[in-house]
C-alpha cells in the first residue's frame, strides 16, 4: 500500500503522462501525492567557470518552475504545501525528499532508453539506484 507518492516531473510537455499515472495510483491506494521539480544549478551548465553572478537567473528559473508546478498542482488536486521546487542534482534531491518526507513510492518519467543510452544514465535510472522506497518509471510515449 502506497500512502505517500512523490511525483518527480521535469515540467516538459510530457509531464502530464507521468502525472496521469500517479493520479491513478493515488486513487487506487488512497494516497497523498507530493509533486516535485528539481532545478539544476545554472552553474552546472557552464561548468562553474562563468565569472558572473547567476543568482538572478537561478531565481527566475525557480519562480518559473514554482508557477508551472502550481498549475499542475491545481489541475491534479495537489495541495500547495505538497508542491516542492528545489535546486540541486535531480537524483540526489529526489532521494533526499523521499527520506525526509517518508515517501512510499517515487514516480518518474522514463523514455524507455536501452543499451548504451541506459548506461550513459538518465534521471530515472539515477533515482532507481539509491532509492529508499519503490520507484515506478512511467514510460513516456
Image: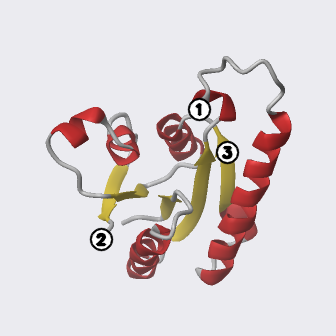
Looking at the picture, how far across and down is residue 47, in whole percent?
A: 59, 21
Specify the quadrant of the image occupied by residue 21.
Answer: bottom left
Residue 66's disc is: none
Specify the quadrant of the image occupied by residue 129.
Answer: top left
Label 3 crowd bin: few (<14), some (14–19), many (20+), radius 10 Å: some
The residue sitting at 54% across, 35% down in the picture is 89
Residue 86's disc is: 3
The residue sitting at 30% across, 71% down in the picture is 141
In the picture of the structure, the residue carrying the numbered disc 1 is 45
- Left or right placement of residue 17 versus residue 81 in this view: left
Estimate the spatial distance between the alpha carbons at disc 3 and disc 2, rounded to whole Å: 27 Å
In the picture of the structure, the residue carrying the numbered disc 2 is 141
57 and 137: which is toward the camera: 57
Looking at the picture, how far across and down is residue 98, in whole percent?
A: 51, 46
15 and 25: which is toward the camera: 15
Where 124 sits versus 50, above or below?
Answer: below
The quarter of the image holding the N terminus is bottom left
Estimate the spatial distance between the alpha carbons at disc 3 and disc 1, rounded to whole Å: 17 Å
Observer-side mark, 3 or 2, equals 2
Is label 2 in a helix, a strand or a loop? Answer: loop
Looking at the picture, how far across and down is residue 69, in whole percent?
A: 66, 65
Kindly check if marks 3 and 1 are in contact, taking CB atoms under 8 A apart as contact. no
Is label 1 in a helix, a strand or a loop? Answer: helix
Specify the quadrant of the image occupied by residue 131.
Answer: top left
Amino acid at each position: 500500500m502506497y500512502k505517500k507518492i512523490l511525483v518527480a516531473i521535469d515540467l516538459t510537455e510530457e509531464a502530464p503522462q507521468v502525472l496521469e499515472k500517479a493520479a491513478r495510483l493515488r486513487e487506487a491506494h488512497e494516497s497523498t501525492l507530493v509533486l516535485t521539480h528539481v532545478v539544476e544549478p545554472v552553474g552546472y551548465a557552464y561548468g562553474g567557470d562563468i565569472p558572473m553572478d547567476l543568482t538572478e537567473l537561478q531565481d527566475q528559473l525557480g519562480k518559473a518552475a514554482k508557477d508551472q508546478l502550481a498549475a499542475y498542482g491545481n489541475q491534479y488536486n495537489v495541495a500547495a504545501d505538497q508542491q516542492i521546487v528545489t535546486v540541486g542534482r535531480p537524483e540526489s534531491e529526489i532521494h533526499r525528499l523521499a527520506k525526509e518526507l517518508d515517501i512510499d513510492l517515487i514516480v518518474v518519467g522514463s523514455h524507455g532508453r536501452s543499451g548504451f543510452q541506459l548506461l550513459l544514465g538518465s534521471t530515472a535510472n539515477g533515482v532507481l539506484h539509491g532509492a529508499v522506497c519503490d520507484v515506478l518509471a512511467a514510460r513516456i510515449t
